Image (cartoon, grey):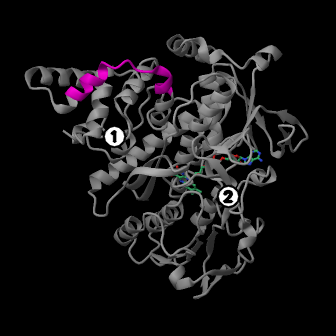
Amino acid sequence: MAGCFGVVAVISPVSSSAVLADAAAAEEPTAAQDAAEAILQIEGDIAYGQFLASECLTCHQESGATDGIPAIVGIAKDYFVLAVVEYQTNVRDSDVMRVQVASLGGEEIAALAAYLGTLDPK
Amino acid sequence: MTKLTRRRFGVLAGIGATTLAMPAYLRAQGAAPRVVIIGGGAGGATAARYIARDSEGAIDVTLINDADRYTSCFFSNLYLGGFRDFASITHDYATLESQYGITKVTGLAASVDREAMTVTMADGATLPYDRLIVAPGIDLIYDAIEGYSEEAAQIAPHSWKAGAQTQLLHDKLNALEDGQNIVMVAPPNPYRCPPGPYERVSMFAHVLKSKGFTNSTITILDPKPRFSKQGLFTEGWARHYPGMIDWLGADIIDEVGAVDVNAGVVETGFGAFEGALLNIIPPQKAGAIAAQAGLTDDSGFCPIDANSMRSTIDENIFVIGDASIAGAMPKSGFSANSQAKVAALNVRGDLTDARVFPARYANTCWSLIETNDGVKVGAQYAVEDGVIASTSSFISETGESDELRKETYEESLGWYAGITADMFGTSA
Ligand SMILES: Cc1cc2nc3c(=O)[nH]c(=O)nc-3n(C[C@H](O)[C@H](O)[C@H](O)COP(=O)(O)OP(=O)(O)OC[C@H]3O[C@@H](n4cnc5c(N)ncnc54)[C@H](O)[C@@H]3O)c2cc1C
């Protein structure tokens, strides 16, 4: 699992999300999926998300362009939230991302998702 | 502006029109508050873009940089190693001007009058500010090394500020013949980019090895007893460049003495070392304008409030990047970019009614040892007991697989594309 979701892997977030959803339908939701589901219920504070996202945009380009680092603009909200939770719980394997997301609580993740949702890929 | 306007309105619709508000006294004057930024590098360019982007025209942003282009020190080692060309590490300010409405002033900021709240340019022009961001990077303390000077750097380059110096070192490196040696004098702490000298030596070795120059050696004379990512570099050098690189730390050389750039000789407590190419990296301090403005302390760098990057000496001024004393954060482009975002938010909080959130900072430094052999060190930071402290961190491990090292290198390419887009507003 970890390998195919490594930071540099070129993936299609939308279709991966669909795959995950299918898998979820077939099996019991994982702990990460449960946690992500709870976060998706929180209304994100866009202004807070704008500041928090500035940290992400150092590497993940605001334009949605990818040059070895996947896009976080223009991807499905549920996919994004689940990915963050999976980095936090070591389901996904990346030193950089583990450290980056370590101090994000549910409110922060919801804020990020809300703000990133206002950006359009170029 | 058109491209931006569309997106600006998108953001605006989401957060409401509140960020357009400004203090009544400024509205009364009918003028937007003015932010002047000295230094258009990793810190200054990022701060300019974020203030302009997020204030949506409510703040007037002027960015001063001494040149009309910026060559990044980050990835300048990869240029030396032949992995990047010079154009790919050189950027302009056109998008910041055309799409973000930032006024770019090309020239040297000569002085700051903190009382009058103005910046005076070398050509005499005066720029008033409501808030000033000082992001000049470092200056080199040439006379800390006997025999070294700005003129001597034309023969024995430091290349610790990118541009002509980087090209000079590149040319000198490529002019070496088999059997000619390189001597690097590494800097004492604190200096910009802790792993930088050692990545650079790796690139020197890569070039020599690629040419089959098996009789050339590289000696690092280091005033420090240890260095960043030492285990990783030591392992990589033994693996890729056996017998080529000698690191002599403070325990051996005691100290670096006089340098004779014409003879190519560096004196140390352990004898003299000779090289056809000397790369002398002197001790460093905040860019001169910071001291001129009275923002530095005895360390030569600028004390700041960890919550905001605001100068502890002047509340109308923020200092970011290499010039600041940023607790546990290394002096890096990544750090400067991260600090810029905290400063930008606080500037907006001062001048508009933008909400200010608790500061958070991040850094990762990637280094290339040999083709596809990348390593990294990084951390997340928060304010603890008034200082910027690391809250979690990681470092590459020795013995990692080739596949992981290649991934790490590729990640660094993504980071470079990302951070330069984040600084200059360009999209790939
Ligand atoms: C060889 C090397 C490799 C590096 N590799 C990395 C890396 O891989 N990753 C990383 O994160 N960091 C790296 N760094 C460190 C990084 O380059 C610096 O930490 C970063 O550039 C600091 O940003 P800054 O904004 O403080 O200063 P700078 O980026 O240096 O920007 C300051 C700008 O202000 C201008 N300026 C200064 N004074 C004035 C004035 N009075 N008037 C007008 N303009 C002025 C300067 O000319 C410059 O353009 C490396 C550094 C070196 C030397």
Magenta-tinted stretch: A34-50
Q: Is residue A32 above or below residue B247?
A: above
In x, y percent, where is residue A5? 26, 37
Give the numbered dot on residue B48. Answer: none
What residue would you read off at disc 1? A8
Which amino acid is tagged 1? Answer: Val
- The reply to whether residue B52 is in sight is yes
- Label 2 – label 1 distance at C-alpha: 33 Å
Q: How many marks?
A: 2
- The reply, left or right, for residue A91 in relation to residue B267 is left
In x, y percent, where is residue A2? 22, 41
The disc numbered 1 marks a residue on which chain?
A: A
In x, y percent, where is residue B66? 76, 44
What residue would you read off at disc 2? B165
Name the image quarter holding the N terminus of chain B: top right
Which amino acid is tagged 2? Answer: Gln
Q: Quadrant of residue B97?
A: top right
Name the outermost residue toward the bottom.
Answer: B271
Q: Is residue B350 above or below residue A7?
A: above
